[in-house]
Image (tube, rainbow, N blue to C red):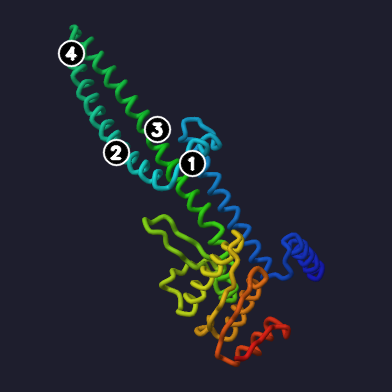
Amino acid sequence: MRDNARRTSDGSLAHLMTASGVSDIEALAHAIQRSDQRRAIERQILEAEARLVQTADGLPLDALREDIAGTGPDELMAQHAELTLSSSHVVEEIAVLSDSYGRLKAGFAELDGTDLAAKAEARRQEAISAMGDAAEQYLKLQTAARLLKWSMEKFRETKQGPMLAKASSIFSGLTVGSFSRLLVDTEEATPRLFGIRPDGESVDVTGMSEGSRDQLYLALRLAALELQVEQGLNMPLIADDLFINFDDHRTGAGLAVLAELSRKMQVVFLTHHAHLVPLAQEVLGLDLNVVYL
């Protein structure tokens, strides 16, 4: 009976591995984790879009995007600062009007039915109307501020996305999977770059080892070169002993990255370390062109 249960379990796992495109249990667990992370991110996106629509005075997302299209980041930041200041002034005005409304209401309660009561009621209605106008202005300013923040984040994603994606892939290869990707934190005034490990731990650049920092800077430079190649600026790359702080394992990974780059541009690797020749031939094959000087 246990054998039947185990075969049923194995069959279910095999079906899940086939659907996930993986070949072992560990990879399946990683795929499930990534799937959970993706669903969480998609849920956050939907919640953010719902909040935008809720505070956007009835405008749909497409109309909001058109409304802020073509506005540069510097202009957006200036508008955001101006709206934030205006928002604080509106809040202060609401507080003043609320206090005025309280005093008028108290005075109205003390009146004995004379014409003063009618005048007080008129002033009360004026105060309520002024409060309504201030509240409406406050909501508009808050909506505009949220849209500006969202548009600045989208601008950063659009401009940094291709570079960061390429650098993440190269960095993961250079570190032999010690880091899975790179992440730019834009919540603070000055954006910060982090390396993300496979278990989700984030490591600041200052917290990386010297070798990992060398691999990070190399990944960023190679990603920039790839983007230049895609823009038609194809020039040879001459690399002079890039892997001084790399062990043999990561040197092999670095050679593999250069080999992949050589499919798009000419790569010349200079070294005075003879032991790298057999390692390069092992990684890249015996067809490697080696020139001794």
Residue 88 picture location, percent across and down: 29, 38
Q: Amino acid at mark 1?
A: Gly
Which mark sits nearer the N-terminus, 1 or 2? Answer: 1
* Residue under label 2: 88
Residue linked to disc 1? 70
Q: Are marks 2 and 3 in contact (CB under 8 Å)?
A: no
> Which residue is at a point 66% across and 63% down the rendered structure image?
31
User: Taking 139 as reference, is 224 left or right?
Assistant: right
Q: Position of residue 26 (x, y in %)?
A: 67, 70
Of the numbered discs 3 and 1, the one sitting upstream in the chain is 1
Question: Which comes before the other along the chain, label 4 or label 3?
Answer: 4
Image x and y of residue 194, in percent:
47, 66
Under tag 2, what secondary structure?
Answer: helix
CA gap, disc 4 and disc 3 = 38 Å
Disc 2 crowd rating (10 Å Cα; few below 14, some 14-19, many 20+) is few
Tell me the distance, in whole angstroms, between the alpha carbons under discs 3 and 1.
21 Å
Q: Please state which of residues 213 and 132 is positioned toward the viewer in this rendering.
A: 213
The quadrant of the picture occupied by the N terminus is bottom right
Residue at the location (77% across, 69% down)? 6
From this view, report whether residue 116 is shown above or below residue 8. above
* Residue identified by numbered label 4: 111
- The amino acid marked with disc number 4 is Leu
Q: Residue at x 25, y 13 (%)?
A: 122
Vertical order, 91 against 243 (above or below)? above
Task: Identify the amino acid type marked 3.
Answer: Lys
